[in-house]
Image: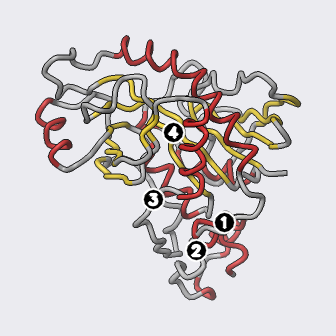
Amino acid sequence: MNTVGVIGGSGLYEMAGLADVESVRLTTPFGDPSDEFVSGTLAGVRLIFLPRHGRGHRILPSELNFRANIYGMKKLGADWVIGVGAVGSLREEIHPGDLVVPDQLIDRTFLRRSTFFGDGIVAHVTFAEPFCPVLSAALVQAAQTLGARVHARGTYVCMEGPQFSTRAESFLYRQWGADVIGMTNLQEAKLAREAEICFATLALATDYDCWHEVHDDVVIGDVLRILNENVAKAQRVIAEVVPHLPGQRSCACARALQHAIITDRSRIPETVKRDLAIIIGKYL
């Protein structure tokens, strides 16, 4: 059975047709994930949901334990993970309410751990193409099948937050060629690549950040209203995409660590080997 992970709002797992639903609590070598995982089956596919900010949205973006979240997905057998979340639009043509499946990232964070490595082991994974092309294409196809307005490419700026951008920053990101801005998906993408998980983002545009001269500056009330309206749309896309994912992965994500671990195997501490066994074990 294919296993697909979904990281997003706490309401995403309330999907029609989801059967055998159960909660799973995990501990990891990196601490606790954001919340309990919710496991279920849909159309012959096992789905693993995790509320990114915890139930009740109580964890700041900078406080998220990204390593525990992705490690938990790996431990539960997810080969595919979809990150669902709100973004601000930096382009006129990306309207609030649109879906975006970005293909590039810019990192503007500075308070977060974004690697499983260190403490006696060094690895450098390729990250030129930060999202899985197979999963991204499947998300676009699913959205188009459902008649949703979706943008098949785009550059996602991941900012630290929790404050929204200044107007100067918003104009700067537009000059860089960025298309949307959010606070979460950069670390998820990096860690998923290290864990050899196929990761893609389904971004829900909620506002025009603060660059737009006609639209009001972003306020959290409007973000939440549009985001809640898009939850059902995201659920439909997920339900459409999961039955069509291949059972065997042929993309580079599945072998991202094949030549990435630089450390002499005999010098890797035993504690690190144990903690990272589900990630690096086949290469030791």
Task: Give residue 36's quadrant in the image.
Answer: top right
Task: State whether residue 180 is above or below residue 21.
Answer: below
Mark 3 or mark 4, which is nearer the start of the sequence? Answer: 3
Q: In the image, what residue occupies the spot 44% across and 45% down?
A: 152
Q: In the image, what residue occupies the spot 36% across and 23% down?
A: 96
3D distance between C-alphas at marks 4 and 3: 14 Å
Crowd band around label 1 with a 10 angstrom C-alpha radius: few (<14), some (14–19), many (20+): some
Crowd band around label 4 with a 10 angstrom C-alpha radius: few (<14), some (14–19), many (20+): many
Mark 2 or mark 4, which is nearer the start of the sequence? Answer: 4
Residue occupied by mark 1: 279
Mark 2 or mark 3, which is nearer the start of the sequence? Answer: 3
Task: Give residue 183's quadrant in the image.
Answer: top left
Using residue 217 as the reference point, say whether residue 25 is left or right of it: right
Disc 2 residue type? Leu
Numbered disc 4: secondary structure: strand
Residue occupied by mark 2: 257
Residue occupied by mark 3: 130
Mark 4 or mark 1, which is nearer the start of the sequence? Answer: 4
> Of the residues tagged 4 and 2, which is closer to the observer?
4
Given contact means CB atoms under 8 Å apart, are the residues at marks 4 and 3 in contact? no
